[in-house]
Image (cartoon, rainbow, N blue to C red):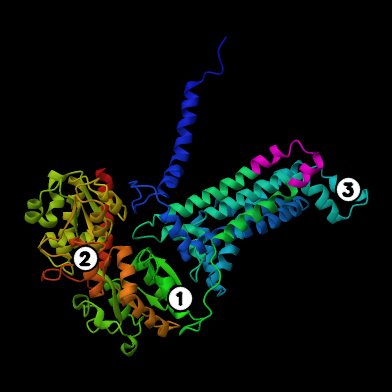
Amino acid sequence: MQNKGKRPFGKVLMVLMIIFFYLPIAYMIIFSFNDGKSLTSFTGFSLRWYQHMLESQDMKEALYTTFSVAILATVISTIAGTIAAIGLSKSKKVIRNLMDQVNNLPMMNPEIVTAIGFMLLFITFKVEKGYMTMLLAHIAFCIPYVMLSVMPKIKQLDPNLADAAMDLGATPWQALRKVIVPQIMPGIISGGLIAFTMSIDDFIISYFVTGGGVKNLSIIVYTMSKRVNPSINAISTCMVLIITFMLLVINLAPVLSAKRRKKEEIKKRRILPGILVTAAAVLLVVFVKFGGSKEERPFEGQTLHIYNWGEYTGENIIADFEKETGATVIQENFDSNEQMYIKVANKEPYDLLVPSDYMIERLIQEDLLQKLDHSKLTCMDKLADAVKGLPYDPDNEYSVPYFWGTVGIVYDKTKVDIKDLEEEGFGIFLDEKYKGDVYLYDSERDSFMMALKALGYSMNTTDEQEIQEAYEWLVQCVETMDTEIVTDEIIDNMAQGRKALGLIYSGDATYVMDENENMRYYMPKTGTNLWSDAMVIPKNAKNPELAHAFINYASDYAGAYDNSSYVGYTSANKEVMDDIYGEGGDYEGIDAYIPRIDNPKDEVFVYNEDTKKIMGDLWSRVKIAASNAD
């Protein structure tokens, strides 16, 4: 007789599936207690990222937004979806079939289509995007899932059940509440849980319908374009614990109440959704910070809207500025200059932007920036001369430097011979000695800069033949060198020494060298990109006076030090730059932190729409060649 209990293949498969699904969660929880900034190397146990999470207003607000929207959307969509399902069950067959198709459409639609549809709807009716638009969108896309869960339960009911209840003296409301709803409660609960899951997990729709600095956790993570903040592991762990608690309550409550009387069990099941909502709400309150100083301050009650790169501000600068001025800072994040440009060109109201050099030039050309009032600026004398008066704004009429640096080669000194770098420069990316051990950065500007400099051309060339040669150089690189094209994952990967060399921004190289003593940074003698990100005020800014105050604060010693020490990019404040690089500084002796200013072949990017389009198209072809080479 065959032993049915012995199924080793099935058991192994089950174990592997559990590992596949739960190992990433376990990894995240473990690294939430990591002492270091690395997301791949555990350096010791610490609660520092939980402390940072509790001190970060952005993260607390994101957590509050995530759960409050999810809870409200779940409750409202569950009620609306249940009522709609019951109403449809009593409708004519033609209407019922039509509404079934309408209900299925949002679930079958690609989420990006739904997101753009909501965005256009709010723009058309001039609805200001923010918390309410996010909530309305979540309610709308959750209702079909609730109806889908409730409808099968309604179809299982005896159609005469409600009539029988009313024949016995019940009102229509009593028949609904005491007869129909208890019978379909399993479908209502499952629909509510699906709605909660869909809402708390949503990114795409939330990203397109939000505004005014309102962000949920998925948006926070997405906009961490420079480097994922390790405290996101801590806040994600808290989310996992909250959801696990809710699941335990849902699954254990019936078991624990089984020994009690049947009426008590029914009563508890009815109030269970309320218990869950209340418990989640209480947990949320812990993370919300109330109160503040009542002392009169210069910008009390005013609001500053900043549009900046993700993970591009220090840990304390926003909170300290708010405390000093009495203003409220709402900071939204972008992950590319082009994304920022689209919003600014569409007249979205921001008071302060932090774009890159070539984009500032474009914004000036298109008259989208206002000139700074230098009588209100107290910071210009504190800034390094090398980062002032750059070609895109020679008199600093429109911009004040924020961070600056170079693009170079980060390399492992145990794998790469410095003589090869000195002889070949960027040409080392074609040296087959390092085949399969090279990272290329996924940016047409920086990659074409590297290729053009390797060929002895200007990175601002408008000669199509030179650009074509650079394209062929890059194709050769990806086809012969087994090159891996990456973005910001190069930071942690090089910190762990996973490749021999890669193209990188100097600020990211600073972090890599700080984490790994074998890493070095090299800038070829043929020249490189000397880049700068600067603070500018849009033409349509509502509060330029407060924007000037923030520019001064971010450029002064305390604000600039907080920014630079946390992010790792070079401060425009000369004293801060010297202190951080000097003895006892956070990046003592790390040469990547100090930009090179004595090489005449180093250049600043100049904006040219025509060459930008050509390079963008050719870079797409380079990536296709890279994928075919794999």
Q: Give the residue drawn at x 90%, y 51%.
A: 166
Nearest to the eye among marks 3 and 2: give it. Answer: 2
Tell which circle, 3 or 1, labels the residue nearer the N-terminal end: 3
Quadrant assignment for the C terminus? top left
Q: Position of residue 247 (x, y in %)?
A: 60, 44
Q: Which mark, residue 323?
A: 1
Check residue 266 for magenta coloring.
yes
Residue at the top extreme, as displayed: 1
In the rendered image, is residue 348 in sight?
Answer: no
Q: Which residue is mark 2?
A: 581
- Cα–Cα gap, marks 2 and 1: 29 Å
- Cα–Cα gap, marks 3 and 2: 81 Å
Q: Position of residue 106 (x, y in %)?
A: 58, 55
Give the SS element for disc 2: helix
Q: Residues within 10 Å of mark 2 (few under 14, many from 20)?
A: some
Q: Position of residue 406 (x, y in %)?
A: 21, 65
Residue at the bottom extreme, as displayed: 375
Q: Which mark, residue 73?
A: none
| Residue 472 falls in image quadrant | bottom left
Q: Is residue 409 left or right of residue 156?
A: left
- Cα–Cα gap, marks 3 and 1: 63 Å
In the image, residue 182 above or below residue 407? above
In the image, residue 91 above or below residue 456? above
Q: Give the residue drawn at x 74%, y 53%.
A: 88
- Residue type at numbered disc 1: Lys
Q: Which residue is mark 3?
A: 165
Quadrant assignment for the N terminus? top right
* Segment tinted magenta in the rendering: 250-268
Give the SS element for disc 1: helix
Q: Residues within 10 Å of mark 3 (few under 14, many from 20)?
A: some
- Residue type at numbered disc 3: Ala
